[in-house]
Amino acid sequence: MLAPITRHFVTVGRRQVHYRRAGSGAPIILLHASPSSSWALDTFTQVFGTRFASLALDTPGFGLSDPLSITVPEATDYADAMADTMDALGIEKAGIFGSHTGATIACEFARRHPHRVTLAVFDGYPAYPKDEQDANLAYYLPKFEPVWTGLHLVDFWLRYREMSNFWPWYAPTRATRAEASGRELEGMHRMVLAGFLSGRGYDKGYAAVFRHDAMGAAAALKVPTCFAGREGDSLIRALKVLGDLPDGCWRETMPNDDLGAAEKYLQMYLDRPVWDPAPSPPATTLRLGAVSKRFLPTRFGPVLVRMAGTGEGTPLVMLPALPETSETLEAEMLALSAKRPVIALDLPGTGDSDSGPLVGVTAYAEAFGEILDALNLAKIDLAGRNLGASVAAAFAQAKPARVNRLILEGPMALPSPLRQAMGTPYAPPIELERFGGHILKLWNRLRNEQLYFPWYSERVESIRRIEPELDADWLTIRITGLLKQYRNVAPIWQTAFADALVDRLPQLKVPTLVCAREADVFADFVQEATRAVPGATHAWLPRDAAGIAAVYDGFL
């Protein structure tokens, strides 16, 4: 039976590193290929976890790990960052496993820190002749630059798809035609999404690999190392390029399937002498002036929690505009954190919280209460945006003694006929499309929300007479968050439109601020919502995080 995976963060200086962990005992550290993240190694993590403590890291700048502060990092910098991460985890010595670009980091780590490695295994080692290395630096990594059309995302999708047609993808000729089937859509989605997450910095890890002296690093190794290639993998050619290997190093050809390869690799580690066991995962520590993340175990699965601030004030808990993620609240969190602890959540079924969507606002409010219990928060200030405001209002109505003050930002106080009319067309299901059409559809929906209400009605009378928020970087953050759990987007919106918030507002018994930014999708309903809440305060919010925090602070 495969070992179950848990998810964690560890603080390394000013950075946080996200990792997946399975099993217990002596540690094996796993490093993924770029631009993916530790999820791509789940099979290996689980197989190794049957006999070891298996820890798969998101390398800096990928997945949920913060990037290095170095402008042009080299493989040596990533290797030393790995050493720092092991120090933070309390691990002195480990087996090392690297896949593709992760193998470059693992090799450099083994070269620079040989006393910390029991056995290094490289599942595809990026060793290229000099002319290929130069060509990859020149053509493989076009910049990731968000543009108003959203085509930077479609380009990334199509480029990844092209890798199953030609290798390298930028040289479409008969000679470079790949012997591979078309990519499976779900796996392609996850890999491309990982690239979206790394954003403008996605090329840093890759470029460091293409600059790396792979042959020189391999020749300098002084630890037992297996250079392996998988049948059908483009990097199997490296086994010939490498030439003679140092004593204690060898080549292997592995089966193409992950499970078969993982079982063979596991035996290699089992053949090593036993080394010291890995400590338990360290607790997440807060970082001054930054948002820190942790995973909270719940009956719904792990819930991602963002935290900022250590002040003495009443904790403020913030709920995003579901189904979006709490990443969209980070700027406001930092601006509010000087006086109080600030916490934001990815509720079940959104962002990085693993679960299906809950059915109904009441179910979300009940889940929110359980999450507060798990966080040991008895009484809070509570803020929610859009559907997050509906959940906040439902919780405050059910548990008024636990809410000190309530902020409803852009509440969905729509009259019943409008809710029923918008429920079906507002958020159609997202279905992955082979040529990236689903990305363009979602991008233009988010953009149209700023231009028309409702977004799908492009009539003159539907034009929004506002200064729209159309920054391409901001839209990229939003769409990336939605695509993390794209299947849940439509059901969660259905939950939003099924809820009669206007009937709940008059029953609120806690001090309430009703507010919105001009560009908020539901800004037109704020004044009606204010009138519905007994004794409510009303405010219009500025566009910037500091201005929003000032209004929040004034009320709190």
Image (tube, rainbow, N blue to C red):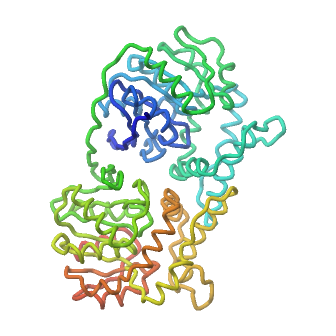
In the displayed structure image, the side of residue 316 where residue 291 appears, left or right: right
Residue sitting at x 23%, y 55%: 374
How far from the left and from the top, in percent, is residue 32?
51, 36
Q: Is residue 2 left or right of residue 14?
A: right
**In-front residue for pair 551/260:** 260
Q: Quadrant of the N terminus?
A: top left
The x and y percentages for residue 324 are 44, 65
Q: Residue furthest front?
A: 1
Q: Which residue is drawn at 31% across and 20% down?
A: 276
Question: Residue 551: x and y, percent?
Answer: 29, 76
Residue pictured at 34% horizontal, 51% vertical: 293
Q: Quadrant of the C terminus?
A: bottom left
Compared to 208, does 160 lie above or below? below
Q: Nearer the viewer, residue 419 or 116?
A: 419
**550 or 238: nearer the eye?**
238
- State whether residue 407 is above or below residue 19: below
Q: Measured from the top left, where is residue 16 in percent x and y?
A: 36, 44
